[in-house]
Amino acid sequence: MDPFDYNSTERASLPRNMIENSMFEEEPDIVDLARDSTAYPTFPALDPDEAVYEPRSSRLLVRGLGENDADDDEEDCESSARLLGMSFMNRSANQRSNPSPYIRQTPPRSCSAPSARTMVVCVLFLAIVASTTMVLYFLPGCNFTKRGCPEQQNNTSNSTDGELFPWAQYQLPRSVRPLSYDLTLSPDFSTMEFSGYTVINMIVLHNTKRIVLHSANLNITKATFKLGDEAKTDVTLLENKTREQIAVKFPEELKAGQHCVLTLNYTARLSHTYDGFYNSSYIDHSGKKRVLAASQFEPLYARKAFPCFDEPSFKATFLVKINRKPEYMTISNMPKAKSTHIADGLVQDEFAKTSVNMSTYLVAFVVGNFIPANRTISDTLVSVYSVPDKKEQTGFALDTVSKLLEFYNDFFEINYPLPKLDLVAIPDFLAGAMENWGLITFRETNLLVGRNSSLMEKQLVASVIAHELAHQWFGNLVTMSWWSDLWLNEGFATYMQFTSLQTVLPQLDMGNFFLDVRFRALDKDALNSSHPISTEVNSPEQVHEMFDSVSYLKGASILLMLNASLPGDQQFRKGIIQYLKQFAGLNTDTDDLWNSLTEVKVSNQHLNVSEMMRSWTSQKGFPLVTVSRKGDEVTLKQEIFLLTSENTKHTSSLWNNPVMYVNDSCSLTPECRQLFILKTKTETFKVPETVKWLKLNYKNTGFYIVDYGDKGWDALTSAMSDNFQVLTQEDRASLIHNIFALSKLGRVSFHQVISLLNYMPKETEMNPVIEAMLQLKEIYQMLQKRYERGPVIRIRSYILNLFGVLMDKQTWTEEESVSKQKMRSVLLEMACELEQEKCTQQAKAMFKKYIESNGTFHIPADLQRVVFSVAAQSDEDWESLFTMYQYATYDSEKQKMLQGLASTQDTQKIAWLLKEGLNGNLIKVQNLEMLIHTICQSYVGNLLAWDFVQQNWNQLVEIFSIGSFTIQKILKSLTSQFSTQSHLNQVQWFFLSLKERGSQMRSVQAALETIRLNQRWMERNLPSLREWP
Ligand SMILES: [Zn+2]
């Protein structure tokens, strides 16, 4: 999945891709499977009946989201439990060795190997507990039973007939495994409901008395079960709504090796949000409303369309049938096998059974009116679908996917395994794209390219396609066992999207794009609220939160680091081919990857891949490398780079860090770089005494920040000032990024930062300019949000002076190079934002010409945002822009118009836009996050948006899900510019009040941490900024 928006230089952006499928797996031999569970290494042999009823006391530890809020009785019990201490409640549940079958397997806590002193403490504790229990027993509203609190109102373990739910864990039991699904779906666009019929063929892996699977919001009307050759019988389903699980209990054990079939009939509403099987509509060129339905299952939504084992390691085959009215068409993962007329004038489309095993999150179907453009590439029929009005916008995507498919087939030495590959532009789509196997779905802006589009827009589309296509191997063919290793999908797909396009479409300049992405990954990972790349995941919110820049961007960055430190450019490729071939059709975890790379000896003896890479995936953060020199001896010291050190336990973190360095005698070409592996806290190496300066992290291919010390920074600053081209542009950008980061840490003064930037008027390349501008803009916006008038004026004139020469050099006509387009848009957007007269006049004139030309004059696509943003500052032009927005058909341009409209300072217009963005009539809800981000750029907008989000929080998390990437981005936009105690208090208070509706999100911790950090930066630098220059 690709959740990132690469369209912005202001933040870490990424597309969201989702695809999956396990194709090369043979139809499993059932008897062997039953006998030898190691054939499925992802299914640990659990005692199948180990955990059953979840007592109320332990429920507190695992309670999910609150659609089932506890009633008063429950609250009383929970309070009691807190008073008593959870360890007692759990232990008491464990210690009940009575014949009750409902035993939760919680590890024993204290008192297990008691010393005399511990014994005394424990006895005292138990005495207190016993007496407190007696008191509580008689309290009204909470009658303790042997199982804890009364169960009749316990929604966590409810069931259709009041029976207890036989499973108490978030992940499903491994005793039964699905082999194949037959799905029949009948969507009805008049009622916006659908009915479904699902047949699941399963194999029993371990003796068990129950089958547990997922189902969410499905009204199951009939369930039957068939064991082996026995007759089919009706069965009762139990349901745990909180966990979205259903279960069937059996009086007799099902035996390992037995085959069984569960059949379920159900109805449900088509989802009105962007997940599950959801409905959508758009207005066509004739003004007619068109309806469609599409699916989005990653990560946890297949269960909203059909009952299933909705976890990535439960791979199976799928046979899909969809009933439709004759005027619609359908698409699914596989080619259509046949269409049959059935009752009520409907047509049933039946798709071929998937030729591969795949995870449920990769199943997909679309019903509506779409038109394909297609061609055949290496025996695969490749089609790009759009709504009929946009058919002429599919050409670039078809060319690009064709080239990329050939590239990946060759690069991975494994051909794309399905007979067809469809790419579909969906008019309503929240993520950037989703890699469903054989049916990749996209947001229209990420697939369709208009006649007048710029290379920047093509870069975006190509990179999303390259990402999603890479998933057909990384993610679909070889899938992570559990969401904790999501990076194996997303880090790889992100890495491949950049590297594949460097070969396939070099004119798109993906290298520069990737560098910016790595800086943003470092920024995010510098917070204490970050997490290791591989992280434990045990709730829906935690699953959603894995879709973040650590999984995507840091994941891609460390793969680049590994590749760059290996000798020869084919070593890394050999290793990943080995990995894909070894695990085709299976599930893996991070160690499998490192072991594969180690086994094929991708490296010479001095680099142990497993040892090196584990230090990067198992701990959060990255190293700060400090360089000091004495004569010919260079000392490197490593410690964790952490912007805020509150509550940190990472003081002793060490990485196995391949440090690449160059020096003043040879600094530009790859041959100049020298490798030093820094493993311990401090190490030394020698350089000739004549060396004037060292630059570590050549081209920023490593994932760390370097502090050169005062002398080192002075030497580099003066080298840049003398001749900035003595370093590559990547290294110049890397120095700029690093020095700003060190300034946040308090390691360098703001004066040192300014000194390094003095060379900027001479700069010619994109990355150093964009990095410096981005960092200065952050400071400018923070000061603006504090109403620090004097410092705002000073930093404004500083920026205009520093970049004035470059701003003046920019043209307003079509520009061919993508890097120059990016640099130009960043420079001019800043110039106009700071009201540089030349810029605003030019933009106004261009808008006037645009309006008067009646559609014949085209604004270069990379300049549209700045032109529309300037225009939107006048009431009259805002109205004209809004009229054009309503009628625009090219989505990419329309999006820039919306960004222009949202840059107004008019409070009434801002409030109206936010409201429209949420109700979805004039502005699609999928654009709300971008709308909020743009609005937050202005002082008044930020406050209004903050207020709006607080008021509408419940609706927002219903649409976007707690922890989702959209919610993460909204929080960041709202809070990242706050730097006062009063804002910190407000943010803290609001999130505290949310409790289970979001207070525990990692992005909340990141927001609070960022505000404190901003506060600290201001305390440190504001006095000098007030006196500056
Ligand atoms: Zn992806």
Image (tube, grey):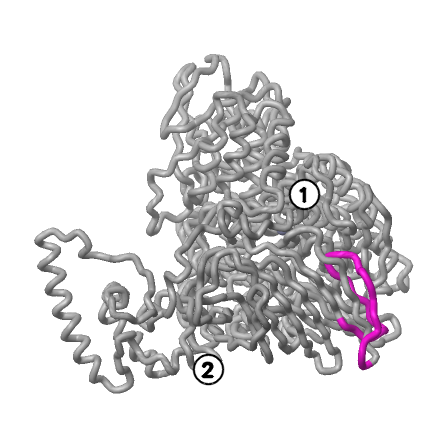
Residue occupying image coordinates x 30% and y 71%: 100
Is residue 398 toward the left or the right of residue 433 in the image? Answer: right
- Residue 722, label in figure: none
Pinpoint residue 391: horizontal percent, then vertical percent.
86, 59
Q: Say which mark, if any, is on residue 497.
A: 1
Q: Which residue is mark 2?
A: 161
Total tally of numbered discs in the picture: 2
Rounded to the nearest angstrom, the CA distance separating label 1 from label 2 is 51 Å
Badge 1 density bin: few <14, some 14–19, many ≥20, Cα 10 Å: many
Picture layout, residue 239 above or below residue 685:
below
* Pick the front one: 264 or 779: 264
Q: Amino acid at mark 1?
A: Gln
Q: Amino acid at mark 2?
A: Asp
Relative to the observer, which residue lies in front, 650 or 806? 650
Where is residue 346? Give x, y as percent: 81, 76
Q: Secondary structure at mark 2?
A: loop
Q: Is residue 964 above or below residue 506?
A: below
One can see residue 294 in this view: yes
Q: Which residues make up the magenta segment? A: 323-344
Q: Could you tell whether 649 is left or right of 611 in the image?
A: left
| Residue found at x 45% / y 40% | 622
Q: Residues within 10 Å of mark 2 (few under 14, many from 20)?
A: few
The residue at label 1 has a CB less than 8 Å from ligand 1: no
Residue 598, x across and y down, in percent: 52, 30
Residue 324 is covered by the magenta coloring: yes
Q: Is residue 549 above or below residue 574?
A: below
Q: Quadrant of residue 996?
A: bottom left
- Look at the picture and state if 806 lies above or below 33: above
Q: Foreground mark, 1 or 2?
A: 2
